Amino acid sequence: MDNGKIEAPFRKQLRLKGYNYSQAGYYFVTICTLHRREILGHAVGGDAHIAPSVLLSEIGAITEKYIKNIDSKYENVYVDKYAIMPNHIHMIIELKDGAMWASPPTNTIIPKIIRTLKTLVTKEAGTSIFQKSYYDHIIRDEADYFTKWNYIDTNPAKWADDEYCEAVPHPMK
C-alpha cells in the first residue's frame, strides 16, 4: 500500500493452468461448505452394530438429489463415485469421449458442472452453503483412480480423523 492503493489479497489458483477441463478422463472433486459448517449431515455408526455412514440433513438430501441428476443433465458425463460428508462432498466425475461440447476456448465442463450443482442446491436450500471454489485432482492412471475411489468409500469410517472434520461439532440446520 505504498502508493495509497489497497492491494487485492492473493488468491491461490486451484485449477491446473492451461489444462482443458473438458478433456475425457476422471476427475476427483472436493466441494466444501461455507466456513466448513457441518450442515450436510452427521456421522453415525462405527461401532460393532452399525457400519459408519453419514445421515444426511435436509440440505444433504437436496445435494444428493442434484448429484444424482448430473448423469442425466450432461451427455457423456458420469458421477462414478461420491460421498457426502457433514461439511464437504467428494466425487469422481468421468468425462467420456464426446463430452467436449464446451465451446472453445473455455473448455470448462467440470467448472460448469460444479457451478451448476452449487447454484441449484443453494437456490433450493434458500441460503448460500458452499465455499466459492472447489478442489480438483486430475486422475492420471488406474492406481490413482483406485486410491481416490477407496478414499471416498472409506471416508465415513475415517470422519473423526478427516482433515475437514471440525473439532467442535456444529448443530445441523
Image (cartoon, rainbow, N blue to C red):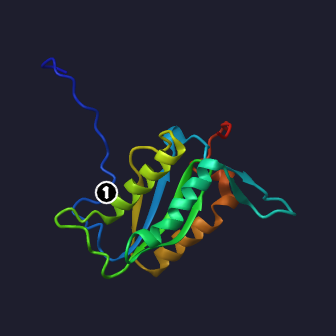
Q: Is residue 136 above or below residue 13?
A: below
Q: How many marks?
A: 1
Q: Is residue 19 above or below residue 134?
A: below
Percent position (x, y) of residue 32? 50, 48
Amino acid at circle 1:
Arg
Quadrant (top left/top right/bottom left/bottom right) for the N terminus: top left
Percent position (x, y) of residue 29? 45, 61
- Between 70 and 28, the residue placed more toward the observer is 70
Residue drawn 87% across the image and 63% down it: 49
Q: Is residue 43 left or right of residue 18?
A: right
Q: Is residue 173 above or below residue 149?
A: above
Residue tagged 1:
15
Q: In the rendered image, which quarter is residue 12 located in?
A: top left
Q: Is residue 32 left or right of residue 25?
A: right
Q: Is residue 57 left or right of residue 29?
A: right
Which residue, as the protein is rendered here, is positioned at the far right? 49
Residue drawn 15% across the image and 17% down it: 4
- Between 173 and 23, the residue placed more toward the observer is 173
Which residue, as the protein is rendered here, is positioned at the far top? 4
Residue drawn 39% across the image and 56% down it: 116
SS category of the residue bearing label 1 = loop
Percent position (x, y) of residue 16? 29, 60
Q: Is residue 69 above or below residue 37?
A: below
Q: Neighbour class for label 1 at 10 Å: few (<14), some, many (≥20)?
A: some
- Between 23 and 59, the residue placed more toward the observer is 59
Q: In the rendered image, which quarter is residue 39 located in?
A: top right
Quadrant (top left/top right/bottom left/bottom right) for the C terminus: top right
Which residue, as the protein is rendered here, is positioned at the far left? 3
